[in-house]
Image (spheres, helix red, strand yellow):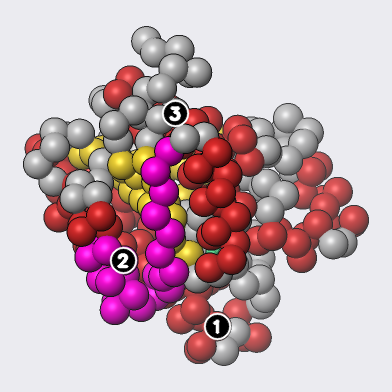
Amino acid sequence: MHAMNERVLENRVAVVTGASRGLGRAIACALANAGADMILLARDLSRLEQTAREIERRGRKVLIQPCDVRSEADVTRAAEQVRSTFGAVHILVNSAGVNIRKPLEAFTLEEWHHVMDTNLTGVFLVCRAFLPLMRGHGYGRILNLTSIMSHVALPGRTAYAASKTGLLGFTRALALELAGEGITVNGISPGPVATEMNRPLLENPDVQREFTSRIPLGRWGREEEIAALAVYLCSPDAGWITGTDISIDGGWTAQ
Ligand code: NAP
């Protein structure tokens, strides 16, 4: 067993989508702490640069690439850039995601597509583009940010829950496809963490309290707790874990 502070990801190259903020940024920094060189993808260039500066301070190589995961052309361009800069990729973390919370009949088709295209089709496009760079090294890790909404539901979450439940199925099927190649594929299903995605909940103290009351451990999760789980799942020690999804939710889905 490796101690968690050891550089278990030395000589590994990791791609993180949604690395401009929130869980993606926290995971990227934690993977870099564990020794990985990093490729950071998202749309907001200036925030990607902020994440990159944090990683450079850790002495790791970092490439930033503005990329909308809904765009096949953007994703293809990003993979091409990574191929010419790094050649190989060992770790891919799909953290880019959006949530639109409203009753079904209030959804426009455009909003529905926005959620599905980002959370589900985006992961398809990114995995398809980067897999050729991940094959043939005998070591690969794909992590998808699923959600408690992959397992349970709330009203107002039809699009989000559909996308995240779909992502869980995608995760299992891809794990089986890649099992013979030493590439594991898993989900991380966090409960609520205070990121920008949850600003609408955090802005309303009643809603925030209501959410907290649903969590048996009595508090929201922390970005660094999710990031530590990601580092473990990307490490050699997690080599026999594939096709599953780890809940990290203060007990929410145990109820
Ligand atoms: P966040 O703070 O809102 O960050 C979302 C990230 O996704 C940003 O970096 C954003 O970057 C990126 N993104 C959104 N649309 C994109 C697109 N079309 N192309 C490329 N990047 C895009 O959210 P978070 O809380 O970190 O969530 C990260 C992941 O965890 C999501 O998949 C979310 O569903 C999942 N999750 C979060 C929670 C939670 O409580 N926070 C719980 C369960 C699951 P740009 O805007 O710069 O493109």
Secondary element type, mark 3? loop
Q: Which residue is mark 2?
A: 78
Of the numbered discs 1 and 3, the one sitting upstream in the chain is 3
The circle on residue 34 is 3
Q: Position of residue 203 (x, y in %)?
A: 85, 62
Secondary element type, mark 1? helix
Of the numbered discs 1 and 2, the one sitting upstream in the chain is 2
Of the numbered discs 3 and 2, the one sitting upstream in the chain is 3
Was residue 75 drawn as part of the magenta stretch in this picture?
yes
Secondary element type, mark 2? helix
* Alpha carbons under labels 3 and 2: distance apart: 24 Å
Tell whether circle 3 marks a residue whose Cβ is less than 8 angstroms from ligand 1: no
The circle on residue 251 is none
Residue at (33% x, 54% y) in the render: 169
Q: Is residue 151 visible?
A: no
Query: Which quarter of the frame holds ligand 1?
Result: bottom right
Q: Position of residue 144 (x, y in %)?
A: 40, 50
Q: Residue furthest right?
A: 205
- Magenta residues, start to end: 60-81
Was residue 63 drawn as part of the magenta stretch in this picture?
yes
Residue at (66% x, 65% y) in the render: 155
Residue at (9% x, 41% y) in the render: 136
Kindly report which numbered mark, 1 or 3, lies closer to the viewer in this rendering. Answer: 3
